[in-house]
Amino acid sequence: MLRVIALAAGVLACASCAPAPQPMAASEASEHLERFAAGASAGEVCTPQGRATLRGAVRAYGAELARAGVAWPALPQGDGEALRSMDTAVVLAFAGGFVEASDLQRASRGMVSRFAFAHWPKMRELRGAGRLACAQMVELQAAAARLTVEMERFERMSLRGDPARLRRQQERLANAQADLEALAALVEREIAEARRGS
């Protein structure tokens, strides 16, 4: 799955055209990031204004949590932990170049960078691919968000110990992962074709 998310991050990459972040209130930032993680505003990152809004939201939300003494994005501390959907979306946006290191709080920069590049090394090969397939990346990010939600449900259900429900959730999780992998393969082929044609 991490290889697939690596592709998603790489397809988003367009660091050279990153606009200045747009200032906003922490409450507005939280709402924007929730919508972004759910895929509702993900397509906006294909525009300079959308990227500026996302960068501003990351800055405002991170600053508010830092004032409360919370490091954000929250990264897994162990193998059994999974990223939450908002954290996944922000780390992917950072890895893909839509969010800059300067948008993150100083305490989180190195940690997020190390996490992103350790888990998604293939992204380095795909930097700049967002110019070729940004719309497809939006679909891929939505699929990654669905997978994250299904993983969170699976973790919660595994604590309850209902074998029948856990089996059904495991099937949903497997389907979400298969959808993500199929979409990632399609995007990878489209990028390869676009590069051959250029």
Image (cartoon, rainbow, N blue to C red):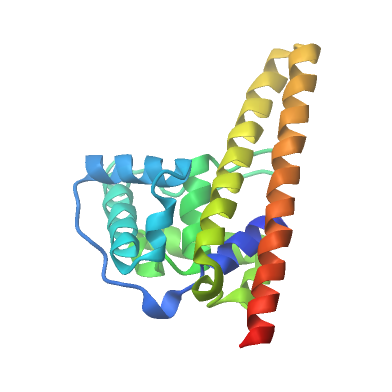
Residue 198 point in image, percent of width and height = 61, 88
In the figure, 127 relative to 145: above or below? below
Say if residue 145 shows up in the picture: yes
Please identify the residue farthest to the front as the structure is shown. 197
Q: How many marks?
A: 0
Identified at 59% across, 59% down, the residue is 115
Residue at screen point 38% across, 48% down: 41
Q: Quadrant of residue 172?
A: top right
* Residue at (77, 36) in percent of width and height: 174
Task: Answer left or right for 185 relative to 197.
Answer: right
Q: Residue furthest bottom?
A: 198
Q: In the drawing, does residue 138 fall left or right of residue 126? A: left
**Frontmost residue, 198 versus 11:** 198
For residue 11, above or below residue 88? below
Residue 121: x %, y % from top left: 67, 69
Q: Residue at x 55, y 68 (%)?
A: 133
Whether residue 1 is visible to the viewer of this picture, yes or no, is no
